[in-house]
């Protein structure tokens, strides 16, 4: 019981750290965008975490973890759970067993060796909202708040948990001959958000002034110190994101996971800064920051399987990928104000494939399974996000008017100013 308590306390601490990441996302997004859209971005971030938790309670958790609707015998899934879609019912209900002496239902303490049912829900619920937060940054400064809210509700409430069940819920990717592996969500969280961000940006179009006469125009963020604070908060939160994914307070595995996480982040930042300097002849802080995030996303799929050297290599490659991915996205005339697609989608794919190339699981068979996983999540995320956003584009519209965009979403959609006593002249 003492070990169970220690494990449960560690998981609750990690839950708090992952919750804290939402502040990091908010700081990063508002820092890299213009001040006239600050309230809009903050509103979306607060909505995502509040509504996300409610949706995960009502339907998401039981979609993602169908529980006793399936059984696994010798690695083969049997019963009602078909490995693609399962549902254990609405709402939350702590698992119980019948006391043989009294015949009454009592709390099932064998639910999990590491932590309670309630801790499990809350930890996983923190992950769920992250997918929509990634999209929020990519569509910043020009998407209507109403359609974004509708998208977030459907994506967090249905798409994310169904996709998550394919691996973490014991679905078909978990039962491949060589199981697909994603330790903490390079694909299940980051790419799920990244694919939707890519679709949304394509359907939404670029901000006014981003591309003029075929040339890329920089639109600077209004508060780079705040963006820097956001990245450092996210790095700290990743201690819970990856550390909690050990699902216990195991000293050896938890410590290794935190080491690989930090080394990948450091390598990603340094290599992104060096690569950017060589390419553009300037020391770009924003590229440095996104390199750190790219390293973190890249190591997330296999943080528990890598040696420190493996982690540095994975992070370093992610850092270089960031610079080239940002450049490619600009050349394709796709406008992503915060670099969400490069960080979460491209580095998420890289980190997932890296499991088959580095560390304890590296093999040809594992690499093939990782490819199958990447393709499977690409399919569900592209199709679902396209249907949701395209239907709204053709019905209610998804983009604000030119006047609203030029004057700022804060004034037109919220009737508020984030800095009423301090205005900058923005265009």
Image (spheres, grey):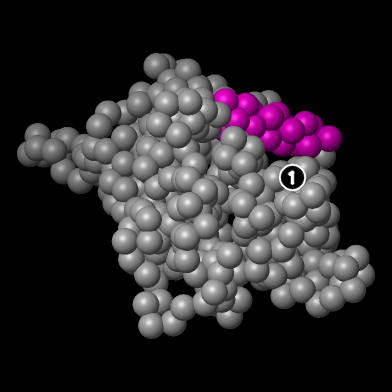
Magenta-span inclusion, residue 369: yes
Q: How many marks?
A: 1
Picture coordinates of residue 424, whole percent (x, y): 52, 77
Taking the spot 9% from the left edge, 34% from the top edge, the residue there is 103
Does the magenta portion include 37?
no
Q: Is residue 380 visible?
A: no
Q: Is residue 176 left or right of residue 141?
A: right
Mark 1 secondary-structure assignment? loop
Residue 60 appears at what percent x and percent y? 36, 37
Majority SS type along the magenta span: helix
Depth check: give the residue in front, 91 or 152: 152
Look at the image and tell me in which quarter the C terminus lies: bottom right
Instruction: Answer with left or right where residue 129 lies relative to residue 416.
Output: right
User: Can you name the residue that lies furthest to the bottom here?
Assistant: 421
Residue 283 at x, y percent in the picture = 81, 77
| Mark 1 surroundings within 10 Å by alpha-carbon count, few (fewer than 14), some (14 through 19), many (20 or more) | some
Residue at the image point whose x is 39% and y is 16% from the top: 80
Above or below for 158 versus 189 = above
**Dividing the image into 4 quarters, which one contains the N terminus?**
bottom left
Of residue 93 and residue 185, the one placed in the foreground of this image is 185
Image coordinates for residue 371, horizontal then vertical, percent: 74, 33
Residue that badge 1 annotates: 333
Residue 313 lies in what quarter of the image?
Answer: bottom right
Vertical side of 282 occupied by 95: above or below: above
The image quarter in which residue 177 lies = top right
State the extent of the magenta-drawn residues as a range. 364-383
Q: Is residue 295 left or right of residue 61?
A: right
């Amino acid at each position: 019981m003492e070990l169970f308590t220690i494990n449960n306390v560690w998981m609750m601490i990690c839950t708090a750290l992952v919750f804290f990441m939402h502040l990091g996302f908010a700081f990063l997004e508002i820092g890299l965008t213009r001040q006239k859209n600050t309230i809009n971005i903050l509103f979306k971030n607060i909505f995502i975490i509040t509504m996300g938790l409610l949706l995960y309670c009502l339907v998401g958790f039981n979609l993602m973890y169908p529980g006793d609707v399936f059984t696994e015998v010798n690695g083969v899934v049997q019963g009602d759970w078909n490995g693609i879609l399962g549902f254990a019912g609405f709402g939350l209900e702590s698992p119980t067993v019948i006391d043989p002496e009294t015949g009454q239902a009592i709390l099932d303490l064998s639910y999990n060796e590491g932590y309670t049912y309630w801790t499990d829900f809350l930890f996983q619920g923190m992950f769920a909202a992250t997918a929509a937060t990634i999209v929020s940054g990519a569509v910043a400064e020009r998407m209507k708040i109403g359609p974004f809210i509708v998208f977030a509700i459907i994506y967090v409430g249905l798409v994310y948990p169904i996709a998550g069940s394919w691996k973490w819920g014991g679905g078909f990717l978990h039962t491949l001959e060589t199981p697909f592996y994603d330790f903490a969500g390079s694909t299940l969280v980051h790419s799920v958000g990244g694919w939707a961000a890519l679709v949304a940006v394509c359907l939404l179009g670029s901000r006014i002034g981003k591309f003029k006469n075929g040339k890329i125009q920089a639109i600077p963020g209004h508060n780079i110190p705040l963006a820097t604070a956001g990245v450092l908060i996210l790095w700290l939160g990743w201690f819970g994101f990856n550390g909690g994914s050990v699902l216990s307070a195991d000293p050896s595995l938890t410590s290794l996971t935190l080491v690989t996480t930090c080394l990948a982040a450091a390598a990603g930042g340094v290599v992104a800064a060096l690569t950017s300097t060589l390419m553009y002849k300037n020391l770009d802080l924003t590229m440095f920051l996104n390199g750190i995030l790219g390293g973190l996303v890249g190591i997330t799929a296999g943080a528990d399987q890598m040696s420190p050297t493996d982690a540095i290599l994975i992070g370093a490659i992610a850092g270089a990928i960031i610079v080239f991915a940002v450049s490619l996205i600009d050349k394709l005339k796709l406008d992503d104000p915060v670099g969400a697609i490069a960080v979460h989608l491209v580095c998420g794919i890289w980190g997932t494939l890296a499991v088959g190339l580095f560390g304890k699981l590296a093999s040809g068979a594992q690499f093939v399974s990782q490819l199958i996983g990447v393709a499977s999540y690409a399919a569900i995320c592209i199709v679902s996000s396209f249907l949701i956003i395209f239907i709204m584009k053709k019905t209610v519209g998804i983009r604000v008017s030119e006047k609203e965009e030029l004057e700022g979403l804060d004034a037109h959609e919220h009737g508020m100013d984030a800095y009423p006593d301090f205005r900058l002249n923005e265009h």
